[in-house]
Image (tube, helix red, strand yellow):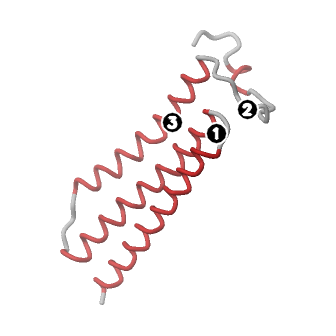
């Protein structure tokens, strides 16, 4: 009984992670500039990948009773590197003066970096 519940929860997590990753890929196509696209890639793709790997982790627990430490390390790795890489992409795009879309009305980073060399 408990194995059926755990496997059902894992399947829900895998499906939810796949849907969030698909929505993130649509965001990469539809959004206007590098700043908006990195937001879609950094937030939604990280969450989708983490849900997928968590679902696989729970599936192995439910089916075999086996705790796979490689999946836990993968979840932690994606949790750390996903937002960090997105942040660094946006920072390098800003330093290269990549143009924002015309719908962007406020540049808060410009005021923060007024007297600093980046």
Residue marked by disc 3? 86
Of marks 3 and 2, which one's residue comes earlier in the chain? Answer: 3
Q: Residues within 10 Å of mark 3 (few under 14, many from 20)?
A: some
Residue 117: image quadrant is top right
Residue marked by disc 2? 101
- Residue at 21%, 60% (x, y): give it: 68
Check whether the beta carbons of the residues at disc 1 and disc 2 lie within 8 A of each other: yes
As measured in the structure, the alpha-carbon distance from the residue carrying label 3 to the one carrying label 1 is 11 Å
In the rendered structure, find residue 36 and report the number of the disc placed on it: 1
- Residue at 40%, 67% (x, y): give it: 14
- Residue at 64%, 39% (x, y): give it: 36
Label 1: which secondary element: helix
Check whether the beta carbons of the residues at disc 3 and disc 1 lie within 8 A of each other: no
Label 2: which secondary element: loop
Label 3: which secondary element: helix
Q: Position of residue 77 (x, y in %)?
A: 34, 44
Q: Residues within 10 Å of mark 2 (few under 14, many from 20)?
A: few
Q: Residues within 10 Å of mark 1 (few under 14, many from 20)?
A: some
In the rendered image of this protein, does residue 19 appear above or below residue 26?
A: below
């Amino acid at each position: 009984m408990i194995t059926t519940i755990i496997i059902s929860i894992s399947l829900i997590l895998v499906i939810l992670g796949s849907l969030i990753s698909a929505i993130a890929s649509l965001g990469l196509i539809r959004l206007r500039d590098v700043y908006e696209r990195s937001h879609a890639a950094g937030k939604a793709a990280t969450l989708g990948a983490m849900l997928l790997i968590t679902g696989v982790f729970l599936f192995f627990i439910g089916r075999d009773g086996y705790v796979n430490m490689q999946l836990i390390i993968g979840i932690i790795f994606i949790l750390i590197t996903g937002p960090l890489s997105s942040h660094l992409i946006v920072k390098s795009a800003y330093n290269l003066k990549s143009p924002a879309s015309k719908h962007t009305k406020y540049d808060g980073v410009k005021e923060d970096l007024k007297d600093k060399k980046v």
